[in-house]
Image (cartoon, rainbow, N blue to C red):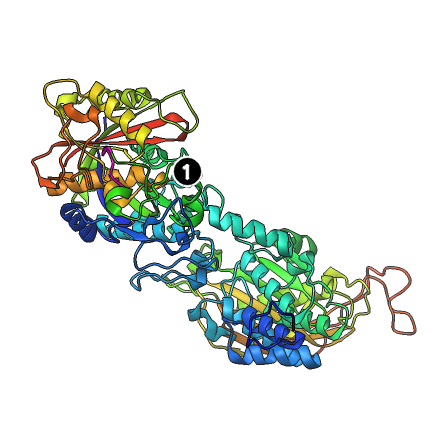
Amino acid sequence: MRNVVVSGVGFVCSIGNDVETVTRNLREMRHGFELYPPFEREQAVKLVGTIKDFDTTSFDAEDWTYPSRYSVKRDVLRGFAPHGLYGYCALRQALDDARLSQDEISNPMTGMFTASAGSVSMLHHNMTRMAERGVMRCNPMSVVNSVVGTLSFNLVAAFRILGASCGFASACASSGHALGYALDEIRLGRQKRMLVIGGEDGNRESILPFAGMRALSASTDPELASCPFDRRRSGFVGTGGGVAMVLEEEEAALARGARPYARFLGWGQASDGHSPAISHPEGQGLSRAMSACLAASGVSPDAVDYVNAHATSTPIGDRAELLALRKVFSGEKKPAVSSTKGLTGHGLSMSGILEAAFCCLALREQFIPGNAHLRVPDLDVASLHLPRETQPAAIQVALSNSSGFGGANVSLLFGKA
Amino acid sequence: MTSDEPEGQVAVSPEQAEEAKIREALRRCSPETVAAALGYRKNKDANLANTVVVGVLCRFVEPDQRPKLQGEPEHLRLLEDLGLDSLTMVEVVMLLEEVLQVHIKNEELQDLRTLGDVKAYVHALSSGLPPPKRPLRMDVAAIAASMPHQPPFLFLRDAELRTSEASGTYAIKGDEFFLSGHFKDRPVFPASLLLEALGQLAVLALLKGPAGFGVGGASVDPASIYFTSADGVRCTRICKPGDVLDFIVRPKRVKHPLAVFEGHVSVNGEKAAFVEEVGLTFDFLRPLDEAGKPSGEVSPDAPVAPAAP
């Protein structure tokens, strides 16, 4: 079977807009939360994991501001939702990081999978304008800049992708699925490399509806607002951004002198078959996804050193995951488990790839990110190892979980390169 | 002023509100464009509409392409030369419609290919005249079906025929049979064939061009057309494989049995050749009556008398 490596990563997220800053903030446990001005009048939610140095508030992409090192031509920018710009910038970083040439990027053996839920804010704006001014007075890019698939339409064209391309939409498991199927694409020999990007607007329209489900924390205190696995948890803090990873067939990557972050060992998925919106109380689907992932990778649970949990800081979801982890890791040796959402917030469709990329940083830099804001663990966690602080550690294997609406669960396994 | 209006706020007149809307719509355009739009709304001066057209196009064109708009060349193609795509054209049209208060029909949008097309179209709309006649577009198959010339000696890939002129293109592929000998190891499209291609476009214009080319709509006999002269030929650019040749011919004098055209060749906006006069002789499928109009029986034996250059 072909080995696959991660040869480049890029971030536009609440804890940093480049690999160095993100790594530093993971080590130093600095969160990315701020009081979000559009939530000033809301009672049910106050904090957001904000994207710094970008302003995508306007519905006219030409008004947006972003770091000057990215220059985006108008004909590329005009079809973007906010997360299109985030994903674009993250991908530029990942491609520079992987040192891929334009010929290698725009090549029939290079494909692109994306994960995004579309842009609710753009859709709302476009529909409002259509109602007010008539369809013939709408931005001709109205469909392309808003519907599910917007991230794929735009980035595949912007980067002149010639291989496979597809967008994934399985809510908070989306980018886990995108990575898993991208791995398969290379293993099946269909593609030599895959660019995978996850993105979310992380704005009022993408986050606020979760308050209606009582899934958001109303706290203004970061310590209380996002504290996965803690008894005081009351909901998540929303965030957005863009994260990109370059997956590459190992021989091809090494032949061109790439310096991989990690090996992508395998993946697994399973569904709860339980509720459209609520996790199975014992995390049955998630435990089967983890077991399937380990079996597919040929790795025993004892060999796992670190688990980056999906835990978003909701009462039901976190407990379900703890129970699933307890079931899978029932042997003598327990992996360290942490949820980095205590620092970043929950990036929805983007969270899977954000945390998979954290696992790659952890494997390359040999550290285990801590559980931010965890003070008094939920009773169930007594038998699991939940480090409070980031610590240096010799780790070989890291697992990343994602769970989405509809009870979709994805587990991804990475190994030291 | 009603009681719930905030204190200190000055009432805005409809004219001011309208001006503010125009300024907002044109906020990414030059001050000259805004001034022209405001002026146009006051006096409906069609020249100001022209300035708005150019200013709006400039706003949507990538900065590195904007110098091409200088001098407002009529034949500058919006898609091929300026890099605008069809969706950007929709944005151009929407903005022009809003600012100039005109309505551009969707099916007519496809006919707006050059800067000259847009200017003529908007000029007609803003003057209350009927829009210009649609050009006749032909692809290589349609051209070959109409012409005595055939591959491998047909140097037109597509053509557009208007009342005032005909334009066409040819992409030099590199595998043309004559390039292996012109020159050895260094293929250059022969200047004589640039002239030939202009002549072919003139032939096509005579055969298929819209009425008003001076031949009164009578049918020209394809087998009757021959080259007679070329005056004032100047070649200024070496054309090589990969280049797309753009041809334009404009009728100068068309009167049976002679047709004289002016010809231009360019590559990506750069002048390649100019011919002051290309002369052709032609005959009608039907002989002329006393009034000089074609009528009566077809005369297959009618001799073609080449005119002296």
The residue at 77%/72% (across/down) is B129
In the rendered image, is residue A307 in sight? yes
Name the foreground residue: B92 vs A303: A303
Q: Give how far across and how far down residue B108 sits, in percent.
A: 68, 60
- Circle 1 Cα neighbour tier, 10 Å, few/some/many (<14 / 14–19 / ≥20): some
Q: Seen from this angle, which residue lies furthest front?
A: B3
Three-letter amino acid code at the position of disc 1: Cys
Q: Give how far across and how far down residue B63 sits, in percent.
A: 43, 70
Q: Give how far across and how far down residue B259 sits, in percent.
A: 72, 74
Query: In the picture shown, does residue A189 fall above or below B20?
Result: above
In terms of image quadrants, where is residue B50?
bottom right
Q: What secondary structure predominates along the stretch shown in magenta?
A: loop
What SS does tag 1 mark?
strand
The N terminus of chain B is located in which quarter? bottom right
In terms of image quadrants, where is residue A2?
top left
Name the foreground residue: B164 vs A345: A345
Query: In the picture shown, does residue A334 fall above or below A142?
Result: above
Residue B146: within the magenta?
no
Name the foreground residue: A370 vs B146: A370
Residue A228: within the magenta?
yes
Q: Give how far across and how far down residue A139 sits, in percent.
A: 55, 56
Query: In the picture shown, does residue B252 fall above or below A197?
Result: below
In the rendered image, is residue B45 in sight? no
Mark 1 lies on residue: A166
The C terminus of chain B is located in which quarter? bottom right
The span shown in magenta is A226-231
Name the foreground residue: B149 vs A194: A194
